[in-house]
């Protein structure tokens, strides 16, 4: 299948140092990890998910030079993710220590690197065309300096470029003025149930979906809620529940990004919105059944999972 639309991802790419532990130790404590890995994470989760469905992914961010950047480039090569922005020659990519406990819950420690040195000129040099998709993370509009660059980039995009916004679990830390601007431009807002509640002030799933659609989502909103799937509201429609898939949870790291990457890739290929959401549910379920980020399966595996449903 030939797809002309591309996914440009601004969510920063970092290296994940993942350790599986029984529980996060108390201050001054020490625990042994039962498993560990060092792998590419951050925005790579969504890009690899989209690429494995057949859509070209472009990293609209900066890598550097050093061992972590080399790991990221190796991952990019496997999924044919392109890196048009010039590398920073003096810094390596940042990293994130991700501690995964026995319940699959994640605790993070982040050390920024070259990805934090993005310039306005870098984004303006990108060849974003009509019909392309642009994925923005809450982290992109959170920090002074980089937030203004990203918001300026969004303001200058053609109206027929599809913008998707994932506010991230630190949505409450996004300055209100920045949040308002990105929500106003987002064609799709993609988040989990907790984030939807924080954005709307409503603890009811359905009510928060409806309220969120009044704030954002020029085309619609998708709210994920774990094993039970997600709820989709196409603009001017009503909330529709799309069933999830039951799996044994190993690691939830990157599950939301996997869902977003697959959902947007399917939309780019012309798939119906609700089928795109169902495929996102299947891919995310598969991803959380193994350790580590960027574990989205290919499109054929997703199709096979859906085919097994009664």
Image (spheres, rainbow, N blue to C red):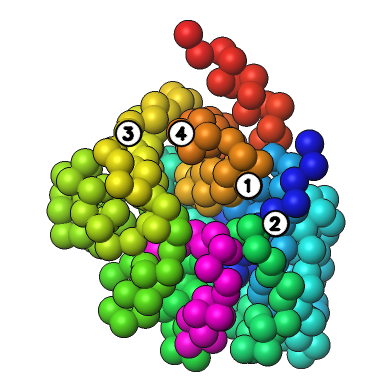
From what the image shows, is residue 71 above or below residue 154? above
* Quarter containing the N terminus: top right
Q: Are marks 2 and 3 in contact (CB under 8 Å)?
A: no
Q: Earlier in the sequence, mark 2 or mark 1?
A: 2
Residue 268: assigned label: 1
- Whole-Å distance between the Cαs marked 1 and 3? 21 Å
Q: Of label 2 and label 4, which has the lower sequence position?
A: 2
Residue under label 3:
240
* Residue 182, position as x, y percentages in the image: 41, 72
Q: Earlier in the sequence, mark 4 or mark 3?
A: 3
Image position, residue 146 (x, y; %): 52, 85
Disc 1 to disc 4: CB gap under 8 Å? no
Span colored in magenta: 148-167
- Local secondary structure at mark 3: strand
Specify the quadrant of the image occupied by residue 296: top right
Q: Are marks 4 and 3 in contact (CB under 8 Å)?
A: yes
Return the residue at label 4: 274
User: Secondary structure under badge 4?
Assistant: helix
Q: What is the C-alpha distance between the residues marked 2 and 1? A: 8 Å
* C-alpha gap between disc 4 and disc 3: 8 Å
Identify whether 239 is placed above or below 154: above
Residue highlighted by disc 2: 6
> Is the residue marked by circle 4 packed among few (<14), some (14-19), or many (20+) residues within 10 Å?
many
x 52%, y 62%: residue: 163
Q: Is residue 294 left or right of residue 90?
A: left
Earlier along the polypeptide chain: callout 1 or callout 3?
Answer: 3
Q: What element does badge 2 sit on?
A: loop
């Amino acid at each position: 299948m030939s797809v002309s639309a591309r996914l440009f991802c601004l969510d920063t790419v970092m290296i994940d140092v993942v350790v599986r532990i029984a529980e996060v130790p108390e201050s001054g404590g020490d625990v042994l990890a039962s498993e560990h890995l060092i792998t590419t994470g951050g925005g790579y989760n969504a890009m690899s998910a989209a690429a494995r469905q057949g859509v070209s992914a472009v990293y609209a961010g900066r890598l550097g030079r050093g061992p972590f950047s080399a790991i990221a480039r190796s991952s990019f090569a496997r999924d044919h993710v392109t890196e048009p922005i010039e590398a920073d020659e003096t810094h390596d990519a940042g990293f994130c220590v991700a501690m995964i406990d026995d319940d699959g819950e994640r605790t993070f420690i982040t050390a920024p690197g070259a990805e934090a040195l993005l310039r306005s000129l870098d984004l303006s040099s990108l060849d974003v065309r009509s019909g392309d998709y642009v994925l923005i993370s809450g982290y992109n509009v959170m920090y002074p300096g980089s937030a203004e660059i990203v918001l300026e980039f969004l303001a200058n995009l053609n109206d027929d470029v599809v913008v998707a916004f994932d506010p991230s679990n630190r949505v409450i830390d996004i300055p209100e003025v920045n949040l308002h601007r990105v929500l106003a431009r987002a064609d799709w807002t993609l988040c989990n149930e907790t984030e939807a509640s924080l954005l709307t002030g409503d603890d009811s799933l359905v009510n928060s979906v409806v309220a969120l659609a009044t704030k954002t989502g020029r085309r619609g909103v998708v709210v994920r809620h774990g094993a039970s799937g997600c709820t989709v509201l196409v603009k001017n429609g009503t909330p529709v529940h799309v069933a999830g898939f039951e799996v044994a949870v190993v690691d939830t790291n990157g599950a939301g990004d996997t869902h977003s990457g697959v959902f947007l890739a399917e939309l780019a290929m012309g798939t119906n919105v609700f089928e795109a959401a169902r495929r996102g549910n299947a891919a995310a379920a598969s991803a959380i059944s193994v350790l580590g980020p960027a574990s989205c399966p290919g499109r054929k595996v997703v199709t096979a999972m859906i085919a097994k449903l009664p």
